[in-house]
Every structure is written in structure tokens, then in C-alpha cells.
Amino acid sequence: MIFIDSNMWCYYFDQRLPEHGYVREPMRETIKTGEIVCNTIIVMEVAHYLVRHFPAEAARRKIECFVNLENMKIIDFDRQIMMEALDSLVEHAYSHGLGGRDATVIATLKKLRVNKVLSHDDVFKRLAAKLEMEVIDPIPTKP
């Protein structure tokens, strides 16, 4: 099972972005063969991006495709995950730059005992060893 971060979904759905070429095939492969997990916070973030960058009908089609993936489990952001996210935020914000949305990802990973995330977010890379998670980033880092 793998958690796919919002930035990967945005790069995947928006062919105009330079990152799209790097994420297209890894995302297609994961969508075809993997078990995907996401939380409702990420769904809203991706939907917001799509609504802001595409006409209404195109955004709606992309959102429906996204939320109706048969192999994606969408986890509700409930009180338990919120409390875990708040704990992670306080623990890692000062030392590693963890933000609120990323704290919800970590809390979801912990709840489901998932240790793999597909993301281009540096904070996950900084926390990978400490949280015993594997961060997969198909986008090359700039020198």
C-alpha cells in the first residue's frame, strides 16, 4: 500500500507542468497495479488545485476519475487522525519544518501502518529515517 501525496496528483493531472513528464509513468503504474491510500484533506487539496487551473467540466471529470479509483482507499480525517496529526505537528514542525497538511499525511500513514509515500515534498525526505518510511520521488532534484 502506498500513500500518494497531493503534489503527485496535481503533476499527474496537469500535463502543462514540467513535473508531469516525470510522474506520468510511475503514477500510471501505481494506479494500474498498486493499492493506494489517501485522506480527505489531500482529496480536497487536489480538487482545489483542479478547480483553480481547469474549466469546470474538465475539473469535474478529473476529480471524479480521482475519487472513484477502485484501488484507492480514502481515509476520513476524523478526530483520532486529527489528534495524531497535531502530535506530529508539534513534534516535527520546529525541527523538520513539518506543516499541518503534511502532518495529516503522517497521521494517516501511522493509522494504517503504511510506510511508503509517493511525494515530491522535502519534509517527508527529512523525516523518512526518523519515521521509518520510504519516500519515492520520481522527480530529479535540481543541482
Image (cartoon, helix red, strand yellow):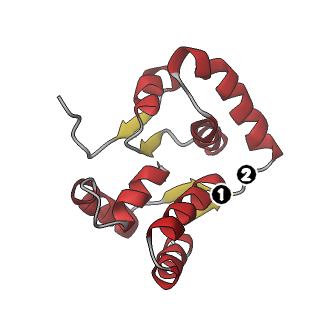
Q: CA distance from mark 1 to mark 2?
A: 6 Å
In the rendered view, tell whether residue 58 sits above or below residue 140: below
Q: Judge by depth and name the residue closer to the eye, 12 or 55.
A: 55
Amino acid marked by disc 2:
Phe
Q: Earlier in the sequence, mark 1 or mark 2?
A: 1
Instruction: Determine the residue located farthest toward the bottom in the rendered image.
Output: 57
Give whichever of 10, 27 is nearer the camera.
10
Residues packed near mark 1 inside 10 Å, few (<14), some (14 to 19) or many (20 plus)? some
Q: Residue at x 42, y 38 (%)?
A: 121
Q: Looking at numbered disc 1 in the image, what kind of residue is underneath it?
A: Thr
Instruction: Tell me which residue sits at (40%, 29%) in the image.
Output: 125
Q: Is residue 83 left or right of residue 138?
A: right
Residue 134, percent from left and from top: 40, 35
Q: Which residue is mark 1?
A: 40
Which residue carries the number 2 mark? 77
- Residue shown at 69% from the left, 21% from the top: 90
Which residue is situated farthest in the top direction here? 95
Q: Residue at x 59, y 32 (%)?
A: 99
- Contact, CB < 8 Å: mark 1 with mark 2? yes
Residue 75 at x, y percent in the picture = 66, 56
Looking at the image, residue 110 lies above or below residue 34: above
Point out the residue furthest to the left here: 143
Residue 141: image x %, image y %? Answer: 23, 35
- The quadrant of the picture occupied by the C terminus is top left
Element type at marker 2?
Answer: loop
